[in-house]
Image: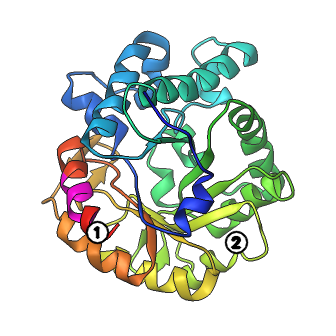
Amino acid sequence: MGGTRERLSDVLARRVVVLDGGLSTALADAGHDLSDSLWSARLLLTDPDAIRAAHLAYFRAGAEVAITSSYQATFEGFARRGLDARETAGLLRDSVALARAAASDVDGPRWVAASVGPYGAMLADGSEYRGRYGLPPAALEAFHRPRIEVLAEAGADVLAVETVPDVEEAEAVLRVVAGSGVPLWLSYSARGTRTCAGQPLAEAFAAVRGVDEVVAVGVNCCDPADVGEAVAIARRVAGKPVVAYPNSGESWDATARDWTGAAAFEPARVAGWVEGGARLVGGCCRVGPPMIGELASALSPGR
């Protein structure tokens, strides 16, 4: 099973590619307790088979790309659990291997995107929806570099630099990867037409100009209602394919560690995103395999 994989960038030049949904959503729906500062990354330590099963559920629903469980897997976070750098690097490599193993259980080509979460994800306090950490750019580069280096060597097809709230952090990551030849997509957490740190999305998307490693730019874990305008801005400004995978439209309460409000993710809306230029589409938090199945079905005739 599985299939020969073209480079994801080549496929995006021809058609839309379906991403998975929220890994934590599939894990929570399967009964796993994720009320932990490591979030879904904890299962890399305690139940890796559950992660593989979650990836497989998305692939079977119609997703073509699995985003790994490394979003909140950091050297700093695992050090607080007593793991050394060698052990943490092994878990980061495991996150890619688990997604690749799930891909081998389904027919057709599937891709693995190694999640590179923002600095705020390591803090586990909702900072990825605020940004402005108060760190100098060099400190952000030092945080991201070792994890990116391990994930880049682990065999993923692309890095998913995701839920970035701040242009300053995005630029730090881009300095780490520029000239490396390692493909990545960059997606911001956003509200309306601004990053969560308040910068205009036009400014944020412009940061990828001239960085050949960037295969797509866009938004994730935002309200579905904000995606259409974000896609239009990204297409106009960046000169790259656009990635879009919003959450359900509910709001995360970092204090209560729970979601509030009503869901607004509707697969039928995705056609508008695609018309606007989105080429990588899927879901984030609270968007599970059934919804990704509906999205894939909605896209199939014109993909």
Q: Residue furthest right?
A: 179
Vertical position of residue 202 compared to residue 110: above or below: below
Circle 2 sits in a helix, a strand or a loop, which is it? loop
Rendered position, 219 above or below 128:
below
Look at the image and tell me in which quarter the N terminus lies. top left
Q: Residue at x 48, y 23 (%)?
A: 101
Give coordinates of residue 270: x percent, y percent. 28, 70
Give me the residue at 43% from left, 72% from top: 278
- Helix, strand, or loop for circle 1? helix
* x then y, percent, for residue 8: 58, 54
Magenta stretch in the rendered image: 294-299
Residue 224 image label: 1
Q: Is residue 132 visible?
A: no
Query: Residue drawn 18% across and 70% down?
Result: 268
Q: Nearer the viewer, residue 36 or 189?
A: 189
Using residue 60 as the reference point, say whether residue 195 is left or right of it: right
Is there any visible trace of residue 98 in the rendered image? yes
Disc 1: CA contacts within 10 A as few (<14), some (14-19) or many (>=20): many
Q: Tell me which label, 1 or 2, sits earlier in the chain.
A: 2
Residue where numbered disc 2 is placed: 208
Quadrant in which the C terminus is drawn:
bottom left
Q: Which quarter of the figure has residue 66?
A: top left
Q: Where does the image place residue 41, in percent across and percent down from the top left?
A: 47, 27
